[in-house]
Image (cartoon, coloured by chain):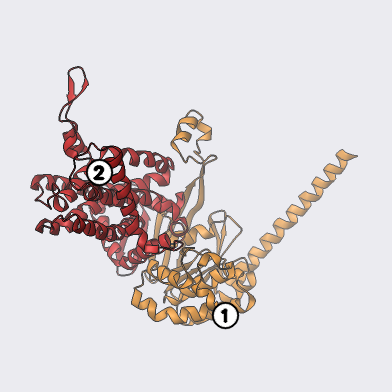
Chain colours: A orange, B red
Amino acid sequence: MSGSVITFENVSKEFRLSKLPVRSLQDIFVFSWRENMRGKQRFWALQNVNFAINPGETVALVGTNGSGKSTILKLISRIIDPTKGKIKISGRLSALLELGAGFHPDLTGRENIFLNGSILGLGRREMQQKLDSIIHFADIGDFIDVPTRNLSSGMQMRLGFSVAVHVDPQIILVDEVLAVGDYNFQLKCLDRIRYMQQQGVTILFVSHDFQAVENLCTRAIWLDEGTVRADGPVQGIISQVKQNYQQQTNKKTTSDKEMAMEINKFSL
Amino acid sequence: MVTVQKDQSTIIVSAEEKLSLWARIRYAAGSMLGQVTELVRYHELVRNLVVRDLKVRYRNSVLGILWSLFNPLLMMIVFTVVFTVMTPYSDVKHFPVFVLCGILPWNFFSASVIGAIHSIVDNSTLVNKVFFPREILPISIVLANMVNFLLALIVLFLLMLVFQIPFTGWVLLLPVVLAVQVIFTIGFGMIMATANVFYRDTQVIMEVVMLAWFFVTPIFYSGQILPRSYELWTGVTIDVFRWVNIFNPMASIIAMYRVILYGNGNGGSPPEFYFFVRTLITALLVLGIGSIVFYRYSARFGEEV
């Protein structure tokens, strides 16, 4: 445990789900007598999650939508706090969670680079030194001096990725944003990720692209309904996940067939 | 209960169910200190957000930053016309200077509070996607408005020259009075920003509250005209002057600006020492309550906005 960069010990995260979001005082008055409307529903996004990631590992988080992958990334980047358990992170962390995260739409790309750098805790001088290579890597030409709201989603992703990889992180979190880039830029990103792997950067990668996962990662953690279902070498996990998907699709198609027969019965 | 411990570059976030009272107090003190050091570490972000705020504000306007000079000037003209031409009852000497001494700090306060209320909710793209100390958002709003205020002071100084009101040595107290106002505004803004994350009514209610607050603060009238005893009900009288001074820190702050700059129209005069100390203590108290409320709830901002 002492050697790992990211440790999750019995981490659980609960979200309050509200049927009707209580957003105003009026809601409190109106709904206080209707107990069931007040959104007492709770939902465990993660339950007793345990894992430890060692320095230099490239780990993929796989699982269906809603299995808790993004919750884990948000916990690691300290955007949300755990309900139970303990999380330990050591090293400078850079996260590429969503498109345009940390960009102000009214500022130009260049201004946003400085804003983003300062959010990640870097000084102005440091950013000045990195500016050229960030702009060069993003490669969006004159659009660097245009307010980011006018940039295409691909361009925003380029800029975001470029900043995230240039701040010399020791840990980097990459959510499924890479898919937005065009073919050439995706290759460039993969190159950069490989380079960071050589530098010993710890990478946490969320993707539904199994081929990319198998190419890049050494280890995979399979999440299912907020729990770790399997954790191990990437090949083994991916084939298990694929098998599971296959089974579910089969189950679904058989039930669809049965349903169709039922409907036919009625219509006849 | 969430604890964050740090050494060098390691961060531990853990949710612990039970803590003794003593441990809680120690933790609270420790985390306050931690928050302050983190704030210092992020000074570059504060700077960038202030610059961003000023840039965005004037980006699409022709006159740009000059608006922070024209705006108070226009307001001063409106008030002067209303209170000396249309209702010529006030016998305040050099009314334009008198009213500007009140309007400028008030605008600074009011714009900061309204900005701080929206600061967390409007920056949802930052708050729920990146980590940084959340208090930076309301603080940078207040500082951006302070820059505006300092620019607007130029107008006031020019006007004082025009009306030949002498600058006295008391003008040197300006940074101190400004500091008191900044402390009070940040504290109040933090409370309002937190409230608005959970109840969006806050922004609507506060618009009305700020309007009422503007009128009960001696801005376009002198605090001296407030009645010392007003008969509320038969036999029940209240000292309006006293109550305004006790319960409205903005009244005291504006009174101090006026005393050190305008005096009675003959140049700045010394402020009362105890009056000043009392206002400072109130401001510090509000900042203390504001930061406790803010830190208590800021961990949930990422889920709520």
Residue visible at 84% across and 45% down? A261
State the residue in front, A165 or A26: A26
**Distance from the alpha carbon under mark 1 to that under mark 2:** 61 Å
Query: Which amino acid is tagged 1?
Result: Lys
Tag count? 2
Closest to the observer, A76 or B122: B122
User: Type of residue at label 2?
Assistant: Ile
Q: How crowded is mark 2: few (under 14 residues within 10 Å), some or many (20 or more)?
A: many
The quadrant of the picture occupied by the N terminus of chain A is bottom left
Looking at the picture, how far across and down is residue A50, in whole percent?
Answer: 46, 60
For the residue pair A96 and B221, the one nearer the viewer reads as: B221
Where residue B295 appears, x then y in whole percent?
32, 51
* Quadrant housing residue A24: top left
Q: Which chain carries label 2?
A: B
From the viewer's side, name the closer residue of B188 and B273: B273
User: Disc 2 marks which residue?
Assistant: B219
Q: Is residue B83 visible?
A: yes
Q: Classify B297 as above or below B33.
A: above
**Residue A203 vs residue B217: left or right?**
right
The residue wearing badge 1 is: A188
Instruction: Label 2, secondary structure: give it.
Output: loop
Q: Is residue B57 left or right of residue B72?
A: right
Left or right placement of residue A213 versus residue A10 in this view? right
Of the two numbered discs 1 and 2 in the rendering, the one whose residue sits closer to the viewer: 2
Badge 1 and badge 2 both on one subunit: no
- Residue at point 44%, 53% (across, down): B122
* Circle 1: element type: helix
Disc 1 is attached to a residue of which chain?
A: A
